[in-house]
Image: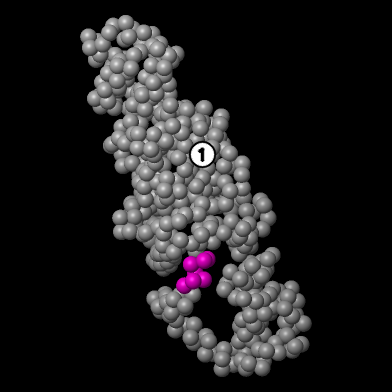
Amino acid sequence: MSTVVFLGPSLSLSEAKAVLPATFLPPASQGDVYRAVKGGARLIGIIDGFFEQVPAVWHKEILWAMSQGVHVYGASSMGALRAAELASFGMVGVGKVFQAYHKGQLEDDDEVAIAHGPAELGYPKLSVAMVNIRATLERAEEERVISKEFRALFEEAARSCHFPRRGYEHVLSVLEGQAAGDEIARLRSWLPEGKVDIKREDALELLKGLSAHQAQAIPPKEVSFSFAHTDTWEKLIRQVEASEGSEEIDELLNELRLDPKLYGQVIEGAVARALALREADRAGVAEQPERFQQKLHSFFVSRNIIEGPKIQKWLEHQRLDADGLIALVKREMRLETVRAGLEPEIRKSLLDVLRSTETYGDLLEKIAAKNALISADELEGFFDNEANPSEERLLNWHFHERLGIGIPAHLDGYITGLGLKSRNAFLQTLARDYLNEAAVSSKPQLAGSEATS
């Protein structure tokens, strides 16, 4: 199972990796959960997320992720907030911060917000989260370091600070002259060893929960709600996808534009694929993990790639790693489901496509010519006629002589990929073409021997 965790200052990356084998990404912002799911994530943990300057991770994308069968956990910081808000929809909340939000004991976002340094330095904390201050003061009171009155005074002073300036030493300096000097001194002396980092504790608890989840064969998430594809949601998707690999895509399009016909074919194919994937999302097409291995096998069989070294070479040439391949095959499965449901509409659109690609007239002429030259009886008794090639020779003629490739190792998978339901239907198509060539010219030459068997 592909596991993704959004992590920032709540816990160090080295500590997180020691607990859970996963892909760790920076704090979540708007669109990041959507990207993770599109990248193949099936289990997501949200610990940290961006506030203020960067758009926060959106509730809607978490709901969408769960509707796609993804299990989503939250704790500690932004994860705790979103889990409390979406618990009734199935997001799993972990830890004390989540519980406080879920029970209504905490409400404000800035209870978990802090200022921190850049990712390159490991997100060094430049302020202290209010939830950590509350937990620390609670312990200090329990251990009789401070009084109940001093605790309330400190909490009020901390709450009045904007979160980037919130910190123990700053608040203590504010309280100088407002509180007993001995309590300030005792707390200042106790803090280095006594302070509580509840966000770190909750983050560790979440990672341990994800580790336990990984160890079990838990089926895809099932939700009780129906995901609504609103205009706002579609706009977000377009914004997210437009920003991904845009420079590389622009360069590829420039190369394609040198061949206008190929450019048109690729764009039309991309449009059809995008609309089909959108329809799969709208219809809530479920994953079918039991079919994944079969589809992975047929994916390479249809390309006549079956040996391990050839598969590896193909992956390297297409710049695909294992996660990318898994995500691609899963998209292929969803497209397959949509195609099956849209077959009547696809058949209706076929003529438009043939006309727009200027192949309709040519194909009709070929069909008319074959119908005039070949009788149904001749086609039906093709392999009974000793003057005609055997099945093996007919396949050699089609693949070797006509297409210049080898016969697919898994011919039935190749035939299914062409939309035919049986080998016999494929052979009949080849026989018809062979008879047509034989009628309009000398008999086709078969590879390796005489023309007939």
The residue under label 1 is which amino acid type? Answer: Thr
Viewer-side residue, 109 vs 363:
109
| Magenta-highlighted residues | 336-342
Tell me if 194 is positioned left or right of 394 in this view: left
Location of residue 279 with respect to 419 vertically, above or below: above
| Count of residue discs | 1
The residue depicted at 50 percent of the width and 35 percent of the height is 206
Location of residue 352 with respect to 7 vertically, above or below: below
Answer whether residue 337 is magenta in the image. yes
Answer whether residue 107 is magenta in the image. no
| Label 1 residue SS | strand
Tell me if 430 is positioned left or right of 232 in this view: right
- What x and y, as percent, mark residue 362? 47, 83
Location of residue 3 with respect to 169 vertically, above or below: below
Q: Mark 1 points at which residue?
A: 23
- What x and y, as percent, mark residue 340? 51, 71
The residue depicted at 36 percent of the width and 24 percent of the height is 134
Query: In the figure, residue 228 lies in which quadrant?
Result: bottom left
- What x and y, as percent, mark residue 37? 46, 49
**Can I make out residue 147 in this image?**
yes
Viewer-side residue, 75 vs 230:
75
The residue depicted at 49 percent of the width and 50 percent of the height is 70
Q: Residue furthest left?
A: 177
Rendered-image quadrant of the C terminus: bottom right
Location of residue 349 with respect to 284 vertically, above or below: below
> What type of secondary structure mainly makes up the magenta span?
helix
Query: In the figure, residue 212 lies in which quadrant?
Result: top right
Viewer-side residue, 192 vs 254:
192
